[in-house]
Structures are given as structure tokens and as C-alpha cells.
Amino acid sequence: MASHVFITAKYLDRCIETSLFGVTVQQVNYLAAISPGDTAFLLETGTGRIAGPFFIRAPLFFSQTPVWERSDDKFTYRLRLTGSEVWQADVSALWNVLLRRRVADFFGFTTFQRSSVGLIGDEGRALTDEIKRTAVRNLNLGSLSIDEQQIDLLQRDTKIFASEARLEASLLLAKDKLLELLKDENLLPRNVSLTILNQVTLPGLNYNIDILLLSETLVVVIELKKDKIDENAISQLKRYKRYWDVCGLAVTLIAIGSSDNSTDSSVAVYSYTIERSHKRLCLERKGRRWYLPVRAGD
């Protein structure tokens, strides 16, 4: 299972008390790559405290019950946490794990304006060991009863998304179907073991890779645009590619947008359309179509 570090500025204790973690609708994509059974850690940036390991109990849900704010709580997209042995340590436990990374994986672990950062390979196990080794206390999880509703990623959108974050979240929540599509298109080997990351920051750049599929020998970089794919998007993808070219990994470039206005054959470009009545996305390329389910309300 995958491992993640959840970022909170000041609410670590409240997350422990309630066994909950939440994000705003604008950052729903940060939790969309997370599945039940995954491992998670909580990092409080205000104090440098880190806690874990936790495990994800159930799928992402929507709730307006106040948890972290007394009223008008904006962190409405939520995950439930569980864990029988949870410890608290200093952020240096995380540094001790991140500094072991190989060069190809040494992209930014930034906490600025984000809610979750994915770990790679066995880093979740290594971070658990480091937190246990340096723990200053062990923690007991509490619980809180709140309302739970199915998330609605379509909201009022009809043909295309008004929010790129919700497009990204839809693709990540349907990641098994997305991976099958890429394998069917021979853009991804069928026997490869992958880490799926999103909103990845490369050194020297002030914007993020939307979705990154990473293995020992290859990388798939996916750029998303809620509107059309143009030459600027293609140039952005090619800029990302140079990082892993330097590292010696094979790189595949993919773009997904509402239409294709590009001319570069080195990038596989897919157009998407919302099929609201079926609660699904239709992805199309070279006359072929694939359908991915979208989490939507009734």
C-alpha cells in the first residue's frame, strides 16, 4: 500500500482527538490518490511535530460538521484515520528518511500550500521505524461522530470541469481504470511496479507536475488542463522531461485536456468530456474512447 504525509499548520492534536483529516474543495485533489489501507503520517508545520503511522479506514467523503473550526469549517473533504500504535516525534525523523533518496527521486518535498505529499517505495516503513526510534510520546486516537456524504466532483459542471483540481481528483480516484488505459495504449508496461504521486515540485520550478507515475526505470508525466491542450502545455511537459533525462530514466509524456490544439507527436494527448448522465469521463485519442467513473452526488 502507498504512504503519505498529511500537512497541517496547527491541527495535529485535533486530528488525533477526532481521527480525522480534511482539506478544502480547492485541494480535494491532494487526497484523491489515497486509498483505504494506505499508511499516513501527520506533519504539523507550525511546531515541527510528526505523528504516525495511521491507516486510512474508508474512502474520501464529504462532511460539513465542524471539526477544526467552530463554525463554517472549510475542511469538508475528509478521511478517517485508525492506528493501534501511534507515536509522536520531531520532523528530523522525516528528514532522515528523505535524505536517503536516490537522485531520480530527489524532487521537492514542499509543504507550502498543500495538504498531502506522497512517499516513495519503502519510505513509509522507514519513516515508521524512525518515528518509533525517536518518539517523545505515544498517542491514543479519539473519535468523533459526524455526518458523511458521498463526494460530488461534478458539482454543476456539464461538458468540462470548471476546476482543474476536480479533474485531477476524478482521474486519481479512478486510477485503476486510468492505468489500464495507459497499458492498453502501450504507454505503460503491464508488469511495472509504480508509485503514483501528484502535485510534484521539481527543483528550480515554481509550478507542479499534476500526476507522476514513477518506477525504478521509467517515469510517466501527465499534464492536465481543464481547457484545451496548447503548445505552452507541451513545452511545460518537455521541461519536466529534462529532469529525468538527466537522471537516466525513460520518460513518457501525456497531456489531458478538453481539446487538442498541439502539433507535437512526442506527447500523447487525450481529450476529455464529462458524460454527466452516466457519471463518467470519456477520454479520446486517435478515434479510440475510454470511460472512467466520476464520484458524483445523486
Image (cartoon, rainbow, N blue to C red):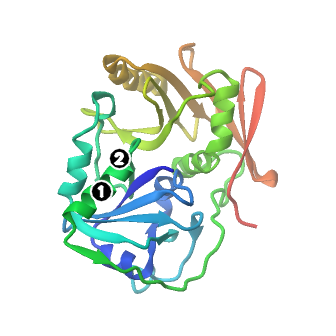
* Residue visible at 43% across and 28% down in the picture: 216
Please name the residue that numbered disc 1 is placed on.
129
* Residue 229 seen in this snapshot: no
Give whichever of 134, 119 is nearer the camera.
Answer: 134
Q: Residues within 10 Å of mark 1 (few under 14, many from 20)?
A: some
Left or right: 224, with 135 as reference point: right
Residue 138 in percent (x, y) is at 28, 75
User: Label 1 amino acid?
Assistant: Asp
Alpha carbon separation for disc pair 1 and 2: 10 Å
In the image, which is nearer the foreground, mark 1 or mark 2? 1
In the figure, residue 262 lies in which quadrant?
top right
* Residue visible at 28% across and 37% down in the picture: 101
Residue 243 in percent (x, y) is at 33, 24
Give whichever of 100, 31 is nearer the camera.
Answer: 100
CB within 8 Å, label 1 to label 2:
no
Residue 139 in percent (x, y) is at 32, 77
In the image, farthest residue toward the right: 277
Please name the residue that numbered disc 2 is placed on.
123
Give whichever of 269, 250 is nearer the camera.
Answer: 250
* 264 in relation to 109, above or below: above
User: Label 2 amino acid?
Assistant: Glu
Left or right: 152, with 106 as reference point: right
Q: Residues within 10 Å of mark 2 (few under 14, many from 20)?
A: some
* N-terminal-most mark, 1 or 2: 2
